[in-house]
Image (cartoon, helix red, strand yellow):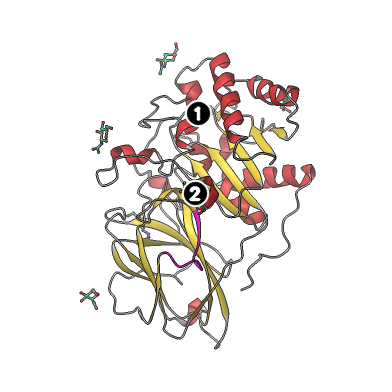
Amino acid sequence: MKVIITAIAFLMPIFSSSALSASTSNATSDSGLVIKNNDPRIHFNGRWDESPGTWWASSGLKLHVQNLKSLSLNLGPHTTVPLASVGVSLNYGEITTVNVSQGVNGIFRESAALQVGTSEGDLSVVRLNVEGWQDNRINLESISLNSDATLLSYVPSKLAFQFIGDSLSAGQFLPEGVDQAWTFLTGEHFKAEHNINAQPGAALSDIVSFGNEHGVSFQFFRTEDTGYFDTTDHNFTTPWNFSRDQPPATHVVIHIGANDAAQNVTDAAFVQVYSNFLVRLRTIYTHQPIFVFTPWGWPNADGTISQYYQGQYQIIVDQRHSIGDDQVFLVNTTGWVTFEDVFPANQHPTVAGHQKITRLFTQWLQKWGLDPELEWATPA
Ligand SMILES: *[C@@H]1O[C@H](CO)[C@@H](O)[C@H](O)[C@H]1NC(C)=O
Ligand SMILES: *[C@@H]1O[C@H](CO)[C@@H](O)[C@H](O)[C@H]1NC(C)=O
Ligand SMILES: *[C@@H]1O[C@H](CO)[C@@H](O)[C@H](O)[C@H]1NC(C)=O
Ligand SMILES: *[C@@H]1O[C@H](CO)[C@@H](O)[C@H](O)[C@H]1NC(C)=O
Ligand SMILES: *[C@@H]1O[C@H](CO)[C@@H](O)[C@H](O)[C@H]1NC(C)=O
Ligand SMILES: *[C@@H]1O[C@H](CO)[C@@H](O)[C@H](O)[C@H]1NC(C)=O
């Protein structure tokens, strides 16, 4: 699908809470306790380069803090100019967007509304991640906490999803980006860790597509998303070390093909590239269940749905079964998304559309046999 980056009037961001705010002045931040960016108590997720800096929507970090009153991110020169939008959640509550830039960014101002540090010794969990599929680089130099805070270790959930896809999984066109996408919301529903490697406009085939220099069958194995190609301070791509995905994914979900179809990749070529991709994924995810989505298609105003690669996903899954891999499952999403669920201008799911997809997929997974965790592994 086309990468359309112009702002759309009806997509004005809506912020449900004013409890969080970023400040690039240092005045409100207490830089008493400085946590270095290599502190093992920081739980990183997603793809971070050596700087260390984020790539791919959803990359971020999690902190478990006792007696939290203030928190600043001190960001370096590889941070997106003028800003990167970060989704922040305190104690597993709703996500609020905070825009951050190079320099000192106070995330929590001491405030009654915020409920941090209300009583001495309280435990807090802070989760934050970049929301955008582009303009998504935060270069972490250090984190400052109030001087009487104690940084503890974050214990990850024993469930961990790895999502792989394109714009339909990256939350393109949503006000809060990936944080409102079905991928992210599915992870939240199961109280699971989740990494989302989804690149708008990219095909699975390693071809140039809508501004992406590479396809996902190449880029998934790299640290950087395809935005590296348009970047002056990091115009290269490096292999991703999958041992850094901690915990390793327990479930892999793939929804891809729209851009291969748009680039006229034939059925046979698509089945071949997908099959090769699964072979390579199995070198990393040796036994984990892999869920292969059929497309829900492009819903049209007249009620029809434009489909692509019909029947081909079944062939891909059948091929895995025929070589003895019974842990690959077809998720038939036919009928999940109608014209009411998409933005008419670009046929991508709206916020409500993503919530509907989340409901249908979580029901599907629960029927398949996966139950949500009852509690997050790190208490707050
Ligand atoms: C913020 O910190 C920088 C570097 O430590 C310093 O140069 C600047 O004066 C500070 N600004 C404020 C508003 O305190
Ligand atoms: C973040 O920045 C974007 C882009 O400039 C802007 O549209 C949005 O309103 C900002 N959000 C907040 C919470 O400041
Ligand atoms: C990045 O490098 C490629 C060659 O590898 C070049 O074609 C491209 O123009 C460069 N991009 C920028 C922004 O310099
Ligand atoms: C990959 O990451 C693991 C875990 O952080 C580390 O032990 C290992 O040395 C890394 N391997 C390479 C080749 O960098
Ligand atoms: C794909 O095929 C259609 C129909 O033949 C054609 O209009 C379109 O230009 C082709 N697109 C590409 C990217 O080759
Ligand atoms: C997917 O579901 C649709 C609608 O229920 C059905 O027509 C189609 O045959 C199913 N496809 C597969 C591969 O099971």
Determine crowd level at label 2: few under 14, some 14-19, many 20+ residues with C-alpha closer than 10 A.
Answer: many
Q: Secondary structure at mark 2?
A: helix
Query: For the N terminus, which image quadrant?
Result: top left
Whether residue 69 is visible here, answered yes or no, is yes
> Is residue 42 within the magenta segment?
yes
Q: How many marks?
A: 2
Whether residue 72 is visible here, answered yes or no, is no
Q: Are marks 2 and 1 in contact (CB under 8 Å)?
A: no
Quarter of the view holding residue 283: top right
- The location of residue 337, given as percent across then percent down, is 61, 36
Is 141 drawn above or below residue 177 in the view shown?
Answer: below
Tell me which numbered mark, 2 or 1, is placed earlier along the sequence: 2
Ligand 5 sits in quadrant: top left
For the record, the magenta segment spans 38-45
- The location of residue 322, given as percent across then percent down, is 74, 22
Q: Which residue is mark 1?
A: 204
Main secondary-structure element of the magenta-colored stretch: loop
Quarter of the view holding residue 71: bottom left
Quarter of the view holding residue 189: bottom right
The residue positioned 73% from the left and 44% from the top of the image is: 365
**Which three-letter amino acid code belongs to the residue tagged 2?**
Val
The residue positioned 36% from the left and 52% from the top of the image is: 137
The residue positioned 58% from the left and 78% from the top of the image is: 123
**Which three-letter amino acid code belongs to the residue tagged 1?**
Leu
In the image, taking residue 196 as reference, residue 35 lies left or right, namely left
List the single residue furthest toward the bottom. Answer: 120
Q: Which residue is mark 2?
A: 178
> Is residue 296 within the magenta segment?
no
Is 202 drawn above or below residue 69 in the view shown?
Answer: above
